[in-house]
Amino acid sequence: MPPPEVTIRAATASESAIILHHRRSMFRDMGEGSADELDRMVEVAGPWLARALADGSYRHWLALDPAGRVAGGGGVLLCPWPANPKDPCTQRAVILNVYTELEFRKRGVARQLMSTILEWLQQQGFRGANLHASPEGRHLYEKLGFEPTNEMRLKF
């Protein structure tokens, strides 16, 4: 199937429900969390998302088909971070919530979203970005040049 004609544009604060729908759907599709846990996540994330969109610490883009339907979305969290020898920036860019609606998958929507996000980050002077890849997204991210890191995690 050929790629859909999509328009990528910045999301507005009034579109928080779409972003939260994508975040919930992303975790659901990966088999992470029960329905109650996902509902609670959305409830807790809502006020944070509103603040982060308002203060610019989170940016989000939506892909719209010619009929104006949302085909997908993706965003970036800008976090304060100490500079290191390889990167003198004092912010870190973490790409989050990259999601494509089922009917638009495997048609280049996520690639177009990622290209938009990466271009924006480069224009802002970032020297790189981090993300956590789902098994389904890993191939795309590798094609875009992302590499595994030495990150470790401890859960309490």
Image (spheres, helix red, strand yellow):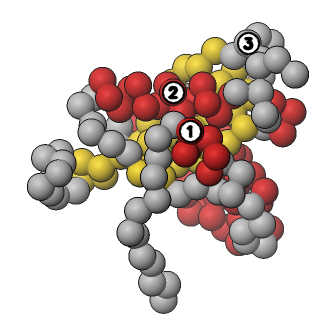
Residue 66 at x, y percent in the picture = 76, 10
Q: Mark 1 falls on what kind of element?
A: helix
Residue 54 at x, y percent in the picture = 39, 37
Q: Residue at x 45, y 78 (%)?
A: 153
Looking at the image, which is closer to me, 106 or 49? 106
Q: Amino acid at mark 3?
A: Glu
Q: CA distance from mark 3 to mark 1?
A: 22 Å
Residue 35 at x, y percent in the picture = 80, 68
Circle 1 is placed at which residue position? 143
Looking at the image, which is closer to me, 89 or 75? 89
| As drawn, 118 above or below 97 | above
Residue 17 seen anywhere in this rendered image of the structure: no
Q: Quadrant of the N terminus?
A: top right
Q: Residue at x 27, y 37 (%)?
A: 126
Residue 8 seen anywhere in this rendered image of the structure: yes
Circle 3 is placed at which residue position? 5
Q: Residue at x 17, y 51 (%)?
A: 86
Count of numbered circles on the image: 3
Q: Residue at x 54, y 33 (%)?
A: 114
Q: Amino acid at mark 2?
A: Ser
Residue 34 at x, y percent in the picture = 78, 72
Q: CA distance from mark 2 to mark 1?
A: 12 Å
Circle 2 is placed at which residue position? 115
Q: Nearer the viewer, mark 3 or mark 1?
A: 1
The answer to which of marks 2 and 1 sits earlier in the sequence is 2
Q: Mark 3 falls on what kind of element?
A: loop
The answer to which of marks 3 and 1 sits earlier in the sequence is 3
